[in-house]
């Protein structure tokens, strides 16, 4: 199976477009530029910047039965105008949708009709087009099938992600997109997202969405040896979806192996199509993508520690980070009760870094320490802190949380943020 390559939601590895080579691409690690720790309130550790990199690639754009070559070129030119999107390469993925026609797809919610669309698509030969008759008042439109392509995910457990292309004719009023993937209507995974896989808000046109399997709800009992026969997509909306729509689309549903997927924060510098040819059905192109961070990100966050109900003045534990680039986690402390609590200190014993947040704490306070965004929030508002945002190393890190006062904070979660997979 060829690699699945995306820029934003646009598929660069379908019958309309194919990448044939990429220059200046590698997967090894080099030294990370760092600024030494500063020791004063509100200081930080700057260790994110590494060498940015331009990726040069070439391939072919092709006309289809329903789209001229110029129409295909226009489609990709428009998609490449978006900036700050993921340039994504997936080398291990499985497809649940056989989109050679619309056989087996059924309507649900406010949808009253569906059809197969061979003009607007992202994968295989077309997409499932469906409407919304909002007067029905169900609050969602969608399609489902009980005849999807079964895949064996037994070797992967709950790792990886289910992902889908969904075309939205309107974003105003859309409250989320729900996906179900399972064995049948009684045994399935389900989840809802409110933005695209690269944190871009939903947009009019094609959207690419991702669901980390370990975070999805489970109904019934999943048989991982034959998953994917039941597939369902719902577009949920509120009162702002006040007019009927005829052109929602589902463009495909896949599973991707996060370990073998690379996402690079990028923008397109140049898309040059060679029009000096005699074949009106295809043309070579050169594409320049600038990966401005120079490091790959994971598609989602991973919870590496989650404990509740702690009552000791000092709590110690360890967390383990995978990947090939310095981790930049976020952790949350929920204060369930507090009497004369005046300071909370978080220490990474392994690196020797600690941060102190001094304030008068009350029950219900929520402290977020985000080393990726380099901020500390108390109940959603940025606050000062003492010492430094702790650094973390790959592998095992010993951590400690201490309080000054007579009651306790609760550690709710420690989330490993992005940047798991190394350099371009």
Image: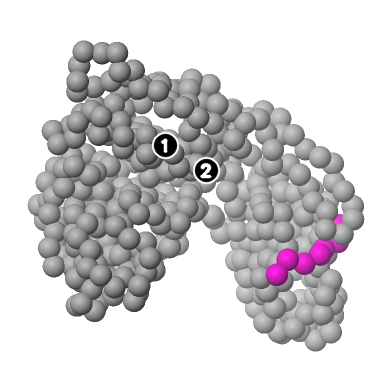
The mark total stands at 2
Picture layout, residue 32 above or below residue 245: above
Q: Residue 421 carries which label?
A: none
Q: Could you say which is closer to the camera, residue 110 or residue 270?
A: 270
Taking the magenta stretch, the answer to whether it contains residue 385 is yes
Q: Residue 84 carries which label?
A: 2
Residue tagged 1: 80
Q: Looking at the figure, which quarter contains the N terminus? A: top left
Label 1: which secondary element: loop
**Residue at the image position 38 percent from the left and 65 percent from the top:** 172
What is the quadrant of residue 231 in the picture? bottom left
**Residue at the image position 82 percent from the left and 63 percent from the top:** 385
Taking the magenta stretch, the answer to whether it contains residue 43 is no
**Residue at the image position 20 percent from the left and 77 percent from the top:** 135
Residue density around tag 2, few if under 14, some if 14–19, many if 20 or more, within 10 Å: some
**The residue stretch that appears in magenta:** 381-387
């Amino acid at each position: 199976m060829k690699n699945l390559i995306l820029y934003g939601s646009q598929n660069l590895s379908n019958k309309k477009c194919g990448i044939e080579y990429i220059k200046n691409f590698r997967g090894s690690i080099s030294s990370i530029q760092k600024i030494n720790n500063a020791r004063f309130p509100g200081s930080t550790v700057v260790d994110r910047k590494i060498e940015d990199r331009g990726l040069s690639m070439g391939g072919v754009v092709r006309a289809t039965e329903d789209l001229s070559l110029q129409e295909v070129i226009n489609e990709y030119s428009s998609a490449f105008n978006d900036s700050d999107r993921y340039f994504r390469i997936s080398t291990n993925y499985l497809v649940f949708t056989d989109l050679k026609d619309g056989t087996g797809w059924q309507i649900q919610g406010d949808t009253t009709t569906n059809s197969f669309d061979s003009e607007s698509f992202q994968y295989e030969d077309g997409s499932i087009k469906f409407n919304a008759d909002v007067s029905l008042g169900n609050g969602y439109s969608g399609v489902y099938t009980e005849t999807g392509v079964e895949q064996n995910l037994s070797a992967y457990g709950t790792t990886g992600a289910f992902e889908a292309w969904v075309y939205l004719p309107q974003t105003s009023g859309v409250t989320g997109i729900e996906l179900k993937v399972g064995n049948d209507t009684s045994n399935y995974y389900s989840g809802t997202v409110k933005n695209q896989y690269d944190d871009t808000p939903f947009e009019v046109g094609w959207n690419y969405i991702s669901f980390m399997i370990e975070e999805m709800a489970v109904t019934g009992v999943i048989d991982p040896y034959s998953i994917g026969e039941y597939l369902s997509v719902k577009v949920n909306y509120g009162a702002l979806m006040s007019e009927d729509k005829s052109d929602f689309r589902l463009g495909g549903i896949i599973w991707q192996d996060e370990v073998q997927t690379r996402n690079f924060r990028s923008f397109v510098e140049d898309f040059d199509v060679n029009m000096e040819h005699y074949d009106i059905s295809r043309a070579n192109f050169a594409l320049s993508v600038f990966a401005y961070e120079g490091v790959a990100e994971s598609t989602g966050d991973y919870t590496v520690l989650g404990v509740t109900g702690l009552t000791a003045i000092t709590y110690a534990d360890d967390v383990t980070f995978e990947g090939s680039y310095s981790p930049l986690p976020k952790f949350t402390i929920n204060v369930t009760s507090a009497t004369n609590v005046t300071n909370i200190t978080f220490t990474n014993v392994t690196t020797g870094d600690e941060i102190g947040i001094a304030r008068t704490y009350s029950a219900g306070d929520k402290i977020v320490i985000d080393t990726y965004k380099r901020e500390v929030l108390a109940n959603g508002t940025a606050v000062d802190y003492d010492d430094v945002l702790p650094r973390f190393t790959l592998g095992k890190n010993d951590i400690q949380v201490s309080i000054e006062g007579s009651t306790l904070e609760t550690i709710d979660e420690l989330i490993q943020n992005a940047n798991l997979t190394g350099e371009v």
